[in-house]
Image (cartoon, coloured by chain):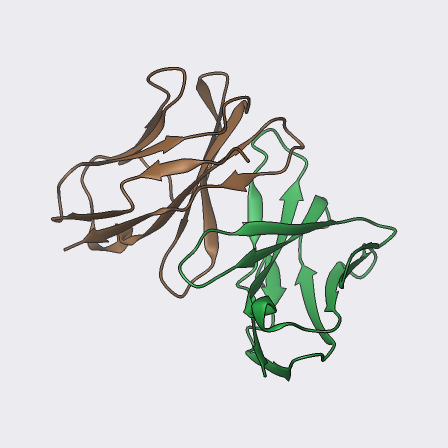
Amino acid sequence: RKEVEQDPGPFNVPEGATVAFNCTYSNSASQSFFWYRQDCRKEPKLLMSVYSSGNEDGRFTAQLNRASQYISLLIRDSKLSDSATYLCVVKLNNAGNMLTFGGGTRLMVKP
Amino acid sequence: EPEVTQTPSHQVTQMGQEVILRCVPISNHLYFYWYRQILGQKVEFLVSFYNNEISEKSEIFDDQFSVERPDGSNFTLKIRSTKLEDSAMYFCASSRGLAGVKFFGPGTRLTVL
C-alpha cells in the first residue's frame, strides 16, 4: 500500500468551478499534513498546512480526518492560474523531519 | 523574500563520474534537506541534516551519496559514482525549526548519460 495515495487525475474543470481532491495516508503515526503545489518542472511550494479542525485560506479549504486517515483540498472559483499538480504531504513526528509526498493530482483549469 | 538557491540548474554527466550539487539555504534556517524527483514520479526524501550531522536518511541515500556543509552558507550533495538511474531533479530544502515550514529551492536537473 502506498504511504500517501492520491488520484493522479487530470481533473479538467472550467474557470469558476469548484474542485475537490482527496488523499489517504497509511501511517497512523503521521503528525503533520500539508498541501503543496507544483508547477511543471518547478519546485514544490507550500499551499497550506492542514489542521484537525479544518482550515481555510481564501478560495482554498483543507480538511483532515484522522480516524479515516484522509485529507482533502477544496478549491472554489477556480482560476486559470490554479492549473498545477497538487501534492498531498505528510510528516511523522521524528527527528529527521522528513516529508512523505503523494504522487500528486493534476488540475487543469480551462477558460 | 528570502529563498533557497541551487546551482547548477542543469548538470549533465557521464555514468561513473562524481557530481556535486550545491545549495544555499535560507540564512537563518537550521535544518537542511535533499529530495529528488525522477521525471514523472513523486518527490522522494533523501536526507536531512542538522547541527552538522545527518539526522535521517532514506534507503535511496546509500554509500554513493554524501552531504556536507563546507562553510556557513553552502549545503552540498555529492554523488560519488553516478548511475543512469540517478537522473532526476534534486531539490534542496531548508526550515527554521523542526516543525517549521520547508522551503524548496528551484532544483538541479541531473542527467546521467
Q: Quadrant of the C terminus of chain A?
A: bottom right
Q: Position of residue B41 (x, y in %)?
A: 43, 62
Q: Position of residue A84 (x, y in %)?
A: 54, 67
Q: Position of residue B101 (x, y in %)?
A: 63, 38
Task: Please count the marks in the image.
Answer: 0
The picture's colour for chain A is green
* A91 shown above or below A9: above
Q: Which chain is brown?
A: B
Taking the image as shown, residue A74 lies to the left or right of residue A2, namely right
Q: Position of residue A56 (x, y in %)?
A: 81, 56
Residue in view at x 44 percent, y 17 percent? B52
* A95 shown above or below A47: above
Q: Quadrant of the N terminus of chain A?
A: bottom right
* A72 shown above or below A99: below
Taking the image as shown, residue B77 lies to the left or right of residue B31, namely left
Residue in view at x 57 percent, y 58 percent? A37
Taking the image as shown, residue A47 lies to the left or right of residue A62, namely left
Taking the image as shown, residue B95 lies to the left or right of residue A17, namely left
